[in-house]
Image: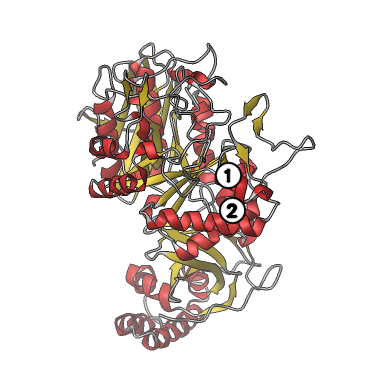
Amino acid sequence: MKAAPPAPAAPGFGRIPISDVWPALEGGAYPAKAVIDELLTFRATVFREGHDAVGADVVLTAPDGSVRRVAMRQVEPIGLDIWEAEARLDALGDWSFHLEGYSDHWHTWAHNAHIKWPIGEDTDLVCLEGADLYGRAVTAALAAGDPESARLLERARDACVPGTEVAELLDWLDNPAVGAAMGRHAPRDFPTPTRDYPIRVQRRRALFSAWYEFFPRSQGAHYDEASDKWISGTFDDCHALLERIAGLGFDVVYVPPIHPVGTTFRKGHNNTLTPEHGDPGSPWAIGAPEGGHDAVHPDLGGLPAFERFVAKAKAVGLEVALDFALQASPDHPWLQDHPEWFTTRLDGTIAYAENPPKKYQDIYPINFDNDPAGIRAEVLRLLEFWIAKGVTIFRVDNPHTKPLNFWADILEKMNSAHPEVLFLSEAFTRPAMMQALAGVGFHQSYTYFVWRTTKRELTDYLNEVSHLTSWVMRPNFWPNTPDINPRFTQSGKASAFSIRLLLAATMSPSWGMYSGFELLEHTPFRPGGEEYLDSEKYEYRPRDFEAAPNLNRLLGRINEIRRAHPALQQLRTTTVLGTSSDDLFAFSKRDGADAVIVVVTLNPDWPVEGQVDLDLAALGRPAGTSVRVRDELTGIEHTWGAHNYVRLSPAQVAHIFTVID
């Protein structure tokens, strides 16, 4: 069905007042985020003067211009006037929606008839009004090409005449098929549209993904006695690791910068300023005589080896995410070709990166106010270059240190040219900036999850990311990164690592981990700090991924459960559940008929027992009922009601229950 969009709504209230439209981000300045076939909830306050009933629809316009209406329903007690509707958008691209309120003659008349007919008040008049209403709906049904509804409504109209028994009148009034037909075809007066609001529908990987990060130079790295230095691994050495990562159920493999590394002010072992012979330097110090952002480090095998790496990843079902760090080492070709892209200080030196008291002498940040047009053209060229090599995802380093209008322009151009390409924002910064970056186009965002460890912190944060900010910012939960060695796991206990893995992978549809986490790597550079000792950022770290102890089996099982359950691929259907212990954290998720309940201990040292209070309504079940659940980790089944006893321990840190009945 095609229809022209409504005229823009005038400021203020229309004939049928509508307010608090959601999702409407910054008044429609940003498109709300969705992925194809994701269950979306639309909400607004709709009301009118007097006692007559109102109704409302969500009117969805697809990228091809086709229009679909979805009826809204009042979901809060009468008097609050909150209306909702659910819909799934089935096409990629830019949608729009508006809400339309109207005077609901059908429910106004039905309400009066239910009151007046049983007490014999105005019986004949109400019949005449009903017959007229049914008749107008018959005409509308025929015009809409719905003869079956027209025939049913004709029968209801013919029965709605003075002298018909009240019981028969009420039978027709309460007939569900009649109600449904009248909902489609009854007259609607005073249709009042809101303005249009944008929704951008993207591929499912934008919401649901499992990332694995590793340094390609460490895979296959070895010490060469003849040269007395470590020799880098190459991309060709990584093919078996790609098979392992895919076998564990990950779908995105992320590699730090793969470009030539500068030698000026190169950092050495544990971030020392005095590197030793053969130290590889930080891969984020991008650029050397061998090339810059469009080159592959020769030690990694060059561009041909990278192309073979991408082809192998695709063959085993992995997408490659490439680090995109807009900065340069002092040896980058940009320093010769475009010195105006950097900041020259009063003493004539070029400003290096700082985050006081931290100094990054091996990195020069770009000044985006110097030649912004030239910088944008170069960035677009680089992105096109790597997309042509098969890269479908970019993990953008420190985007919060670049202007928002720069990203708005870059990401809009990318969306137009390559809507399939995704961007992850690595911005551990202020909430306003993180959300604004998401608003201007980043598909996913790093989060504060790594620092949220208590029940109160997890409750508040899960409610925030799943409800308050979910339309603009899609979270990606990481239990560790090369920069963050979490204090929670610095004990080295497998139970602590399992807890954080399970929370990350079930709380958020997207999650990721940096290699070594499955091997329980935990030693900090200094007590109380969050840097890893012998950080892979500055040296080679070849690993035996089958060494004991490891979490490989748990990793594979968790990713398998996530893929099997649409509920765990959703964000906005999350409900945090009450527990009687501060060491128990629980929540549920649902997508249609699929419902999952997750209970995790927060104590890696001792057994924990307590009560979990189930929100049956959140699972689509009536109050006072029970559900049959199966633990996906153990296979054991239970019957759960409103209040349920659990006991978890370091040996079994979680339940992941599927509602089976």
> Could you tell whether 537 is left or right of 658 in the image?
right
Looking at the image, do the residues carrying marks 1 and 2 touch, with CB atoms under 8 Å apart? yes
> Which residue is located at x 52 percent, y 71 percent?
108
Q: Which mark is residue 240?
A: none
- Placement of 419 over or under 346, stated as above or below: below
- Placement of 237 over or under 336, stated as above or below: above
Nearer to us in this view, 188 or 134? 188
Q: Secondary structure at mark 1?
A: helix
- Placement of 465 over or under 370, stated as above or below: above
Quarter-wise, where is residue 352 in the image?
top right
Q: Earlier in the sequence, mark 1 or mark 2?
A: 1
Q: Secondary structure at mark 2?
A: helix
Q: What is the spatial separation of the Cα atoms under label 1 and label 2, in whole angstroms?
A: 8 Å
Percent coordinates x, y for residue 512 in the rendering: 40, 36
Q: Which residue is mark 1?
A: 399
Q: How is the image coloured?
A: secondary structure
Q: Is residue 377 visible?
A: yes
Residue density around tag 1, few if under 14, some if 14–19, many if 20 or more, within 10 Å: many
Judged from this view, the residue extending furthest toward the right is 346
Nearer to us in this view, 505 or 51? 505
Which quadrant holds the C terminus? top left
> Which residue is located at x 63 percent, y 75 percent?
8
Identify residue type, mark 1: Pro
> Which residue is located at x 71 percent, y 43 percent?
343
Which quadrant holds the N terminus? bottom left
Percent coordinates x, y for residue 479 in the rendering: 43, 29
Q: Which residue is mark 2?
A: 407
